[in-house]
Image: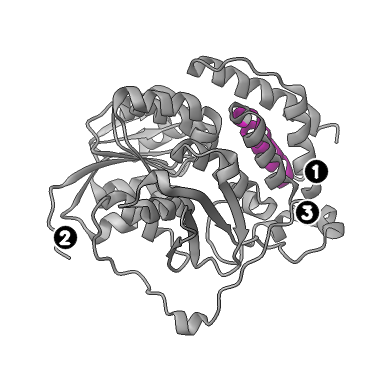
């Protein structure tokens, strides 16, 4: 395919994280197609500095004030250097053809929402944004005309399967899950799982938070809620199937019982490249899939009793998707507490259920209410984690 096209101006929220680094790897293969506008980090200022030298952005944002001051002292970067939440908001206000939102956790919600309100196109890898504020974000996108392009491999796969189809003919969206490192581990052994074991994913290389989420299968639960907001189908039209090889990334079933699947090796650069070039495709130097070498593809139903987090997420989706903000905040605290060895692996879903049963929500009409509910949930979950 001819790769000639106008230069697309891109800013990346979270450029030093896993998705941010892989996004820059994709962009480095097509320097004539993309121009970096802004980059951000929280603490990895050494990597950020090397990224500025290679990609020459117009500006950077460092979330941590301490690291911001240190970066300003050590760097020769001549562009703008901003700090904190105001800096992220400023970045989201710039003339970006595409904003890649790949911050981890709730931190990505407000700058993503700000860009959406301005009508920008957002390539979304921060699933927590839609899980926590899906109603508000999708409502603002309709008002502004903003587009949301999913980077997550599952939602990106659905996007590809839906291209050219009549959405009214869709009967089900099926998200695939690897099953994580404990797919075959008896539930009786879950209380003894260590963080070192949980951080070893069999197929994907990801950050620590999302890797733990994969081990509990909460990652798939968050993706279900994200799919609900992205594609506007009810919980009864969303499903999960465990597919250990991670070759099929998601499937769409249609009313005539035909099913389309998007396939590829487990390489996040592939959905990233599609999000960056959408709706076109560019050629990239990625490893290619060899089905004969792979040999077979297997599938099984999720074990909802063993992976309670997935069941909890489904319940939230069926009951009230707005509770996603409580689910997400409690899960972030639970994962953090497990990594710090304050709670056991099998107590992660317990802590989340406690928060969902304790915290009440009202109509979430603006971001301030969502931020307060998130903070309230975190306070409760932190206190509760110390008593488990």
The secondary element bearing badge 3 is classed as: loop
- Which residue occupies 23% across, 37% down? 58
Residue named by callout 1: 347
Residue 84 visible in the displayed image:
no
Reply yes or no: does residue 329 show up in magenta: yes
The secondary element bearing badge 2 is classed as: loop
Residue 326 visible in the displayed image:
yes
Q: Position of residue 240 (x, y in %)?
A: 60, 54
- Mark 2 Cα within 10 Å, few/some/many (few <14, many 20+)? few
The secondary element bearing badge 1 is classed as: helix
Q: Which residues are magenta?
A: 324-339
Q: In which quadrant of the rendered image does the C terminus lie?
A: top right
Residue named by callout 2: 3
What secondary structure is the stretch in magenta mostly built from? helix
N-terminal of the pair, mark 1 or mark 3, is 3
Task: Nearest to the eye among marks 2 and 3: give it.
Answer: 3
Numbered-mark total: 3
Q: In which quadrant of the rendered image does the N terminus lie?
A: bottom left
Residue named by callout 3: 306
Q: Residue 352, relative to residue 375: is it above or below? A: below
């Amino acid at each position: 395919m001819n790769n000639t096209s106008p230069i697309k101006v891109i800013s990346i929220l979270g450029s030093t994280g896993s998705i941010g680094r892989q996004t820059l790897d994709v962009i480095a293969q097509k320097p004539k197609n993309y121009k970096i506008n802004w980059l951000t980090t929280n603490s990895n200022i050494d990597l950020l500095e090397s990224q500025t030298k290679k990609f020459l952005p117009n500006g950077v944002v460092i979330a941590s004030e301490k690291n911001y001051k240190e970066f300003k002292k050590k760097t020769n970067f001549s562009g703008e250097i901003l700090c904190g939440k105001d800096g992220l908001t400023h970045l989201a206000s710039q003339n970006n053809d595409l904003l890649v939102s790949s911050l981890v956790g709730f931190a990505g919600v407000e700058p993503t929402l700000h860009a959406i309100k301005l009508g920008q196109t957002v390539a979304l890898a921060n699933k927590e944004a839609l899980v926590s504020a899906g109603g508000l974000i999708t409502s603002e996108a309709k008002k502004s005309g903003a587009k949301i392009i999913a980077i997550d491999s599952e939602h990106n796969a659905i996007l590809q399967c839906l291209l050219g189809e009549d959405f009214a003919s869709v009967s089900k969206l099926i998200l695939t899950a690897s099953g994580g490192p404990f797919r075959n581990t008896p539930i009786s052994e879950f209380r003894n799982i260590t963080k070192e074991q949980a951080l070893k994913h069999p197929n994907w290389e990801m950050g620590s938070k999302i890797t733990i989420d994969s081990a509990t299968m909460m990652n798939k639960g968050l993706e279900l809620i994200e799919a609900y907001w992205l594609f506007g189908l009810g919980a009864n039209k969303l499903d999960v199937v465990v597919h250990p090889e991670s070759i099929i990334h998601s499937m769409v079933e249609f009313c005539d019982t035909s099913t389309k699947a998007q396939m590829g090796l487990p390489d996040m650069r592939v959905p990233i490249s599609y999000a960056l070039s959408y709706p076109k495709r560019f050629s990239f130097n990625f490893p290619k899939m060899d089905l004969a070498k792979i040999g077979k593809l297997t599938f099984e139903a999720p074990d909802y009793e063993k992976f309670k987090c997935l069941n909890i997420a489904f319940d939230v989706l069926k009951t009230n998707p707005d509770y996603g903000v409580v689910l997400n905040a409690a899960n972030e605290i639970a994962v953090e507490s497990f990594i710090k060895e304050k709670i056991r692996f099998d107590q992660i879903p317990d802590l989340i259920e406690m928060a969902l049963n304790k915290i009440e929500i009202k109509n979430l009409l603006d971001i301030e209410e969502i931020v307060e509910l998130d903070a309230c949930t975190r306070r409760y979950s932190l206190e509760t984690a110390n008593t488990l």
